[in-house]
Structure formats: C-alpha cells, structure tokens
Amino acid sequence: MSEVRSLQAQTITSQTFVHRESLKIEVIQKLISDVIKGADSVVKRFKQMKLEQLTKDQALEMARIYPATISKEVGWLDFNKKDKTFVPRVQGVTAFDAFQDVTDILSHTEKLGYETKNWAFQTADKILVRQELRA
C-alpha cells in the first residue's frame, strides 16, 4: 500500500473519522445498521400515510405554499376563479397520494432550480410526512 501523506476527515451519517486511520469494521457495521434503521422508519411512515386521509388543512397549506407550481395540477385542489381561492377535495385522497403527486410534479418541473426544488421537497415532507402545519 502506498503511503498517504494527507489524511482527510470523512463524514458518513453522523460519524466523522480520518480515512484509513480510524476506519474499522465495527464503525462501518454500525453506520450500515443506522442507515437500515432509518430506511425502516421511512417505510413504516409511508405505510401509515397510505392509511391517513389528506386533511383540508394540509391541502390548503400546499395551495398557499405552491399556488402555481403544484396547486393547479393536482386533483385534490380546485381553483375558484371567481374568488381566487383554492377549494380542497380530499375525500378518498391519502397523505401518501398527495405526497406522491407533489414530489412527482416537483421532480419533473423545469421552472425551479436545484435549491428551490430542495426547499420544496423539504416543505412537502414537513406538511405531509411530519404533519407540521404553520400556526
């Protein structure tokens, strides 16, 4: 093995170590275990979302945040041109359905740049997955 003159710190998940110097099998095993646990919790949450009805508050919050990009393209929001307001139609729509709609539209829009899309994905996660609505 050649001599490494410059050892750089590496971060994987929440562990920081100097590559080659402190990278041990036990550390890698723990990191992989943590990633699997995280993936399991995401799958569990998505399964729960498939059973949860999209709420009118969630739909209206999505309309408030994404009035042009998403709100006029989903089937669970109608735009009332007379009043210039959105009307939620959430009957039979799950939180998972709404999340899929939003992330699909965001993924395929060319109007938004990387940072804006990243913010939009995080906001959709906050409203539909973590169910955090503004006060």
Image (spheres, rainbow, N blue to C red):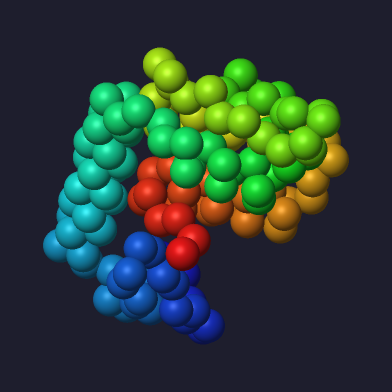
Task: Determine whether, in the image, residue 74 is placed left or right of residue 97.
Answer: right
Q: Position of residue 66 (x, y in %)?
A: 69, 44
Residue depicted at 55% across the width and 53% down the height: 123
Give the residue drawn at x 63%, y 56%. 119
**Figure quadrant of the N terminus:** bottom left
> Is 6 placed above or below 126 here?
below
Front residue of this view, candidates 30 and 127: 127
Residue 78 shows up from this direction: yes
Residue in the foreground of this view, choosing between 125 and 11: 125
Rendering coords of residue 131 (x, y %): 38, 49
Q: Quadrant of residue 107?
A: top right
The residue under the point 77% across, 36% down is: 83
Can residue 121 be seen here? The reply is: no
**Residue 52 location, x and y as percent?**
30, 30
Tell me if residue 122 comes above or below residue 6 in the rendering.
Answer: above
Q: Residue at x 36, y 50 (%)?
A: 130
Give the side of residue 90 with respect to residue 118, left or right: left
Q: Residue furthest left?
A: 26
Residue 121 percent location from the top left of the image: 57, 47
Please tell me which residue lies in front, 125 or 31. 125
Which quadrant would residue 15 be assigned to in this image? Answer: bottom left
- Give the farthest residue toward the front: 82
